């Protein structure tokens, strides 16, 4: 049976700031992120199976990514909890803002690594995460490939 890659795309709005950065991104700002999630597997060959012919139901993949990434990060502000941004984060939280504190500098590169880890934990054992593409702007994106991280 052939291996097939299935891709589902997602969009969400997230703010962040890069503490210690030497450019404009040190300021709190936001992006309209686009996330492409590609998984790899073999189509189900059992004609009696409700998902016959599918690698994974797009709806099942959507549930995982929506729960682990989109619902968490959409309209949130992400800060590295190991920086002085923690004070700003606490103030925003007091004012009922959705803030996510992470253990890393919230660059697209580090976010895509985090997302890969979160998604992989919830995929069925016969489905493998192949790659992620996190697009921050129309012309800038970070990519994660399983083959690069074995």
Image (spheres, rainbow, N blue to C red):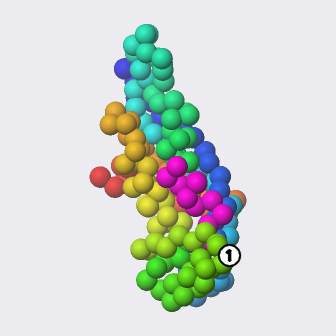
- Position above or below: 51 against 9: above
Residue at horizontal 48 percent and vertical 24 percent from the top: 54
Q: Position of residue 142 (x, y in %)?
A: 53, 61
**Residue at which label 1 appears:** 29
**Splitting the image into 4 quarters, where does residue 26 fall?**
bottom right
Q: Is residue 107 visible?
A: no
Q: Residue farthest to the top?
A: 47
Residue at horizontal 51 percent and vertical 39 percent from the top: 61
- Position above or below: 126 against 53: below
Q: Which span is picked out in magenta?
A: 67-77
Q: Is residue 75 magenta?
A: yes
Residue at horizontal 49 percent and vertical 52 percent from the top: 68
Q: Position of residue 96 (x, y in %)?
A: 64, 73
Total number of numbered labels?
1
Q: Is residue 78 visible?
A: yes
Q: Is residue 92 left or right of residue 49?
A: right
**Splitting the image into 4 quarters, where does residue 134 fall?**
bottom right
Residue at horizontal 53 percent and vertical 55 percent from the top: 69
Q: Is residue 124 left or right of residue 107?
A: left
Q: Position of residue 3 (x, y in %)?
A: 40, 29
Closer-to-camera residue (139/61): 61
């Amino acid at each position: 049976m052939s291996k097939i890659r299935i891709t589902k795309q997602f969009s969400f709005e997230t703010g962040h700031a890069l503490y210690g950065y030497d450019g404009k991104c040190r300021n709190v700002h936001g992006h309209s992120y686009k996330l492409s999630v590609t998984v790899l597997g073999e189509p189900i060959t059992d004609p009696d199976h409700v998902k016959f012919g599918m690698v994974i139901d797009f709806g099942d993949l959507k549930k995982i990514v929506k729960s682990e990434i989109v619902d968490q990060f959409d309209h949130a502000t992400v800060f590295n909890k190991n920086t002085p941004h923690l004070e700003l984060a606490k103030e925003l939280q007091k004012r009922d803002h959705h803030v996510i504190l992470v253990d890393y500098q919230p660059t697209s590169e580090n976010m895509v690594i985090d997302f890969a880890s979160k998604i992989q934990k919830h995929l069925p054992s016969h489905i493998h995460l192949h790659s992620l593409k996190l697009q921050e702007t129309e012309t800038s994106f970070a990519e994660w490939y399983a083959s690069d991280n074995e």
